[in-house]
Amino acid sequence: MNTRCGFYALIGAPNVGKSTLVNRMVGAKVSIVSPKVQTTRTRVLGITIREQSQIIFIDTPGIFAPKRRLDRAMVASAWGGASDADGVLLLVDAKRGIDSDTQSILDGLKKQQRKVMLGINKIDLVKKPVLLDLAARLSETDIFTEIFMISAENGDGVKDLLDNLSENLSEGPWMFPEDQISDMPSRLLAAEITREKVYLQLHQELPYAVTVETEKWEQGDDGSARVNQIIYVQKAGQKAIVLGKGGSKIKQIGESSRRELEDLLGHRVHLFLFVKVREKWGDDPERYRDWGLDFDA
């Protein structure tokens, strides 16, 4: 049988469930998730095999009205991922409906005269009449080739979506080895995992002022890894929040991150976290290069 391969970009407003859906469709965690909006900062590739098809998902940052340099770079990355892909799936939160961010995306797609697929996510959170009304209003935009109603959280409708994506790929050779599920380097993935744990522990206390960098990665003779990471914050008061009383918060973050890294990597991880203040890390071009973002967007 001939093989198929292609890229699908997932776009949408912040926190509509793009990363959760990519992880669900890949069958493993390749993109971090938190209740905090704008968690995803860069394009992440998630790769899955479905019969003879290799589907490569581009998980993009949420599209919203940017205010800071990092915001602009993230939004530019999301639109860039959409333009580079063979197909696009716009994800809409069934509960939030057509909010201002989603309306802005719809306007952008109309301007580009781009036909895309629609995924209405979190269908388990709304009643059927509300869901059908939202689907009807979105259908009237004449942007969508197909509409899927799904729940990325519990998997409802995801199989039908995957089957459709697989069948609509063009014939061609696979672009990645069969056992590869992402293109993210281990050092960056490890930093993202720790940043997720910071968000989950402190998302109500800490603003968008934190980033994580893997400073050192040493592989031991026994197969274990020693990983040193720096959590950068912008103010001294934020450092105290991350550390917690008697170092309690940083300990919880480290333990949670280490366990997940060991599960993902399949070997022992010795994780050491340090917190430093760097007021303008959001204006450091090197950070943007690490994330694959355009500093001048």
Image: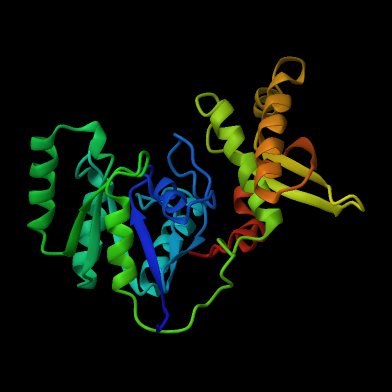
Q: Residue furthest top?
A: 245
Q: With 264 as the anchor, is 96 left or right in this view?
A: left
Colour mapping: rainbow
Q: Residue furthest right?
A: 221
Residue 206 shows in the view = no
Q: Is residue 274 above or below residue 20?
A: above
The image quarter containing residue 272 is: top right
Q: With 115 as the anchor, is 47 left or right in this view?
A: right
Query: Residue 28: where, in percent of width, then height?
Result: 52, 50
Query: Residue 260: where, in percent of width, then height?
Result: 65, 40
Q: Residue furthest front?
A: 1
Q: With 247 as the anchor, is 118 left or right in this view?
A: left
The image quarter containing residue 93 is: top left
The structure residue drawn at horizontal position 66% and vertical position 25%, both measured from the top left corner, is 237
Query: Residue 79: where, in percent of width, then height?
Result: 38, 64
Q: Nearer the viewer, residue 16 or 244?
A: 16
Q: With 39 as the anchor, is 285 left or right in this view?
A: right
Q: Is residue 137 above or below residue 35?
A: below
Residue 20 shows in the view = yes
Looking at the rendering, in which quadrant would you find the N terminus? Answer: bottom left
The structure residue drawn at horizontal position 51% and vertical position 52%, both measured from the top left corner, is 41
All told, the count of numbered labels is: 0
Query: Residue 156: where, in percent of width, then height?
Result: 29, 44
